[in-house]
Amino acid sequence: MKIVVLNGSPRPKGNTAALIAAFKEGCESSGHQVSVIPVGTMNIGGCRDCEYCHTKGGGTCVQKDDMEKVYPALAEAEMVVLASPVYYFGLTGQLQSAVSRFYAVGAPAAKKWALLLTSGSPDVYPAIEAQYRGILNFIQAKDLGIFEYDGKQVGTEAAFGEVRAFGASL
């Protein structure tokens, strides 16, 4: 299976990146192909609601930025994983910008999804979970798992083991 992980963290060696590495290791042990796209460090503007994509653009966005590197991966993915640290009860702004740009293509092709979240605080996840479930409902995709690690759980072998096992089980 081709799996695309959208890493929303701007920290290339942070907790989210470590969690993604464990997930990727598990996936690859079962023969899956995993591409990690570091949207947290890319130049991706949010959707401008100009409607170019749905009028003149034929599903392509008028903005010419790093999202052009993301669209081909999304088109080929059988599974998408959104991975993000939680900043003030939401996905990082960088990942949120990428998600808003899904609008141009209508819906990513992948029908299997998962969510990996890290935070320094507990109880900061409900708004993200609601958004995630709303997206999946809209695109008629299946949630394969939501993994949330906060406080003392972040960066532990228990957390890494759980997502590694999840990846291997796919």
Image (cartoon, rainbow, N blue to C red):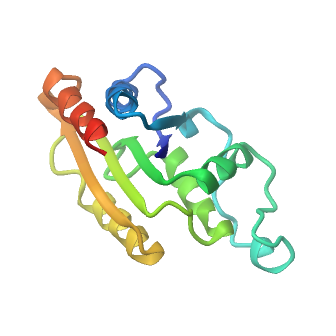
Asked if residue 85 is positioned above or below residue 136 in the image, the reply reads: above
Residue 16 at x, y percent in the picture: 36, 31
Residue 14 at x, y percent in the picture: 38, 23
The residue that appears at 35% across and 65% down in the rendered structure is: 142
Closer to the camera, 78 or 15? 78
The residue that appears at 68% across and 67% down in the rendered structure is: 104
Asked if residue 112 is positioned above or below residue 57 in the image, the reply reads: above
Query: The C terminus is located in which quarter?
Result: top left
Which residue is situated farthest in the bottom direction here? 55
Q: Is residue 89 left or right of residue 78?
A: left
Asked if residue 95 is positioned above or below residue 62 in the image, the reply reads: above
Q: Is residue 118 visible?
A: no
The residue that appears at 79% across and 56% down in the rendered structure is: 63
Closer to the camera, 17 or 72? 72
Asked if residue 88 is positioned above or below residue 158 in the image, the reply reads: below
Q: Is residue 11 left or right of residue 25?
A: right
Report the number of discs. 0
Q: Is residue 32 visible?
A: yes
The residue that appears at 59% across and 32% down in the rendered structure is: 41
Q: Is residue 12 left or right of residue 66?
A: left
Q: Quadrant of residue 127?
A: bottom left
Which residue is situated farthest in the front direction here? 31
Closer to the camera, 10 or 108? 108
Which residue is situated farthest in the right direction here? 56
Residue 144 at x, y percent in the picture: 29, 56
